[in-house]
């Protein structure tokens, strides 16, 4: 089963999620919502000071990118309720702007048609916070729609503290 993903926010975390997800066969990135033109996004994907040059191909194509032969739609919409997640068939939105970390705000992606939202930062009133290797057994896909991946500090310390 292929999971369709949209990334909302394309700073450091959004770009790192993109670089990892685009090479996974079971993930299909259908859209990036960011305030940059395709040419800038292509450059930001291709060249990273910390992680080096992206191994694949990245080309701007009007209002899209073509990455490793896959078309990824570029959207520039600040209001999550106006995002076309339903028509694009988005399963998961990666919320990486830092602006929609409260459940009611993140839930706007659900109202726009996404099935799940993963926050890349600590949330407020989210359905669950998951730290892989620590409490991922608590994730209930049937009832958790807004999921926080905690903070970078928590992800560093919690696995060590658990053992």
Image: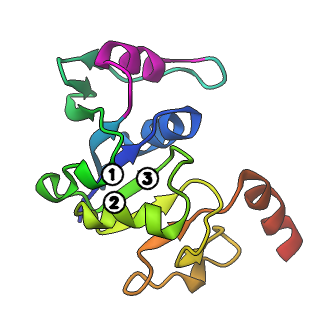
State yes or no: residue 44 in magenta.
Answer: yes
Mark closer to the observer (1, 3):
1
Give the residue at x 43% y 53%: 94
The residue that mark 3 highlights is: 94
In-front residue for pair 35/12:
35
Q: SS for tag 2?
A: helix
Question: Which is nearer the N-term, disc 1 or disc 3?
Answer: 1
Does the CB distance between marks 2 and 1 fall below 8 Å?
yes
At horizontal 21% and vertical 34% (from top left) the residue drawn is 73
Gap between marks 2 and 1 measured at Cα = 6 Å
Location of residue 57 by image quarter: top left
The answer to whether residue 142 is above or below residue 129 is: below
| Residue 86 in magenta stretch | no
Q: Alpha carbon of mark 3 to alpha carbon of mark 2: how far?
A: 10 Å
Please indicate whether residue 156 sits to the left or right of residue 30 in the image.
right
* Mark 3 Cα shell of 10 Å, populated few (<14), some (14-19), many (≥20): many
Callout 2 crowding tier (Cα within 10 Å): few <14, some 14–19, many ≥20: many
- In front of the other: 56 or 161: 161
- Looking at the rendered image, the disc whose residue lies closer to the viewer, 3 or 2, is 2
Which tag, 3 or 2, sits closer to the chain's start?
3
Principal SS element in the magenta part?
Answer: helix
**Residue at position x 27%, y 28% from top?**
68
| Spot occupied by residue 129 in the image (x, y as percentages of width and height) | 61, 72
- Whether residue 24 is visible here, answered yes or no, is no
Residue under label 2: 109
């Amino acid at each position: 089963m292929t999971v369709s993903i949209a990334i909302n926010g394309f700073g450091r975390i959004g770009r790192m999620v993109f670089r990892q997800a685009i090479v996974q066969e079971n993930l299909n990135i259908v859209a990036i919502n960011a305030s940059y033109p395709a040419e800038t996004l292509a450059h930001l994907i291709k060249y990273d000071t910390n992680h080096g040059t992206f191994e694949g191909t990245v080309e701007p194509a009007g209002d899209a990118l073509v990455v490793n032969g896959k078309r990824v739609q570029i959207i520039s919409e600040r209001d999550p309720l106006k995002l076309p997640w339903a028509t694009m068939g988005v399963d998961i939105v990666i919320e990486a702007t830092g602006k929609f970390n409260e459940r009611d705000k993140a839930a706007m992606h659900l109202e726009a048609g996404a099935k799940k939202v993963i926050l890349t930062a600590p949330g407020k009133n989210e359905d669950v916070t998951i730290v892989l290797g620590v409490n991922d057994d608590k994730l209930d896909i049937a009832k958790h729609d807004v999921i926080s991946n905690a903070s970078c500090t928590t992800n560093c310390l919690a696995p060590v503290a658990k053992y």
